[in-house]
Image: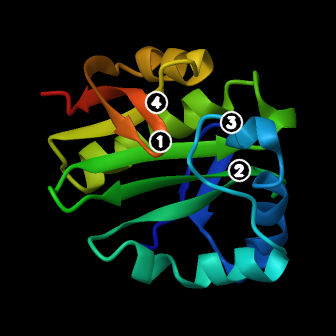
Amino acid sequence: MSLTFNTERLVLRPLEPKDASHIFLLNQDAEVLKYVHDVPFADPRAAEQWILNIARELPLGVGRWAITLRDGTWIGRCSLRKQPDCDVLMGYRLLREQWGKGYASETVAALLELAFTTRRLPFVLSKIARENIGSRRVAEKNGGVLWKKDVCGHFTDALVYRFVRPS
């Protein structure tokens, strides 16, 4: 799905090859990767190849987006990824200098709007490392309810938050 959508301060648009240098830098920061199962890209070309492979990596659908400020400043990426069991997982990642500004909450609210209004999904899940207090707060602020514990990448004790479409 190649939708672009706006929030009060952000634009979420499909990732493009021109985003490779940003993706590369994002995945070089150990603090950004601390609670996810990704590893740094070898070089910007590897990041570009990852972007070019998005359709193949998401065979069941939905998408990955760049997160930019309204002025075009690139600040991160986000996704909704349909799983083989038909659950849809939501995720995001921001450059560290953008943490603490409310952009994560604004991104999650936009992704939930897309999931519930455009896609008419009954619910969305987010797997969060137990130690990732910031992301847990973002989930709870946006109506996520701790649903169960599960494995997520190398985290055997991840928490699964469930967001249910409003009736």
**Colour mapping:** rainbow
Identify the disc placed on residue 128. 4
Give how far apart the Cα atoms at labels 4 and 3 are: 11 Å
The number of discs equals 4
Q: Secondary structure at mark 3?
A: loop
Give whichever of discs 4 and 3 has the lower sequence position. 3
Give how far apart the Cα atoms at labels 3 and 1 are: 24 Å
Is residue 40 positioned above or below 108 on the image? Answer: below
- x, y percent for residue 165: 20, 33
Give how far apart the Cα atoms at labels 1 and 4 are: 19 Å
User: Within the image, what quadrant is residue 116 found in?
Assistant: top left
Give how far apart the Cα atoms at labels 2 and 4 are: 18 Å
Is residue 162 toward the left or the right of residue 152 in the image? left
Give whichever of discs 1 and 2 has the lower sequence position. 2
Choose mark 3 or mark 2, whichever is in front: 3
Residue lying at 52% horizontally and 15% vertically, measured from the top left? 137
Q: Mark 1 = which residue? A: 110
Q: Mark 2 = which residue? A: 76
Q: Secondary structure at mark 1?
A: helix
- x, y percent for residue 163: 28, 29
Identify the disc placed on residue 34. 3
Residue lying at 48% horizontally and 54% vertically, measured from the top left? 79
Is residue 155 toward the left or the right of residue 97 in the image? left
Residue lying at 29% horizontally and 17% vertically, measured from the top left? 145
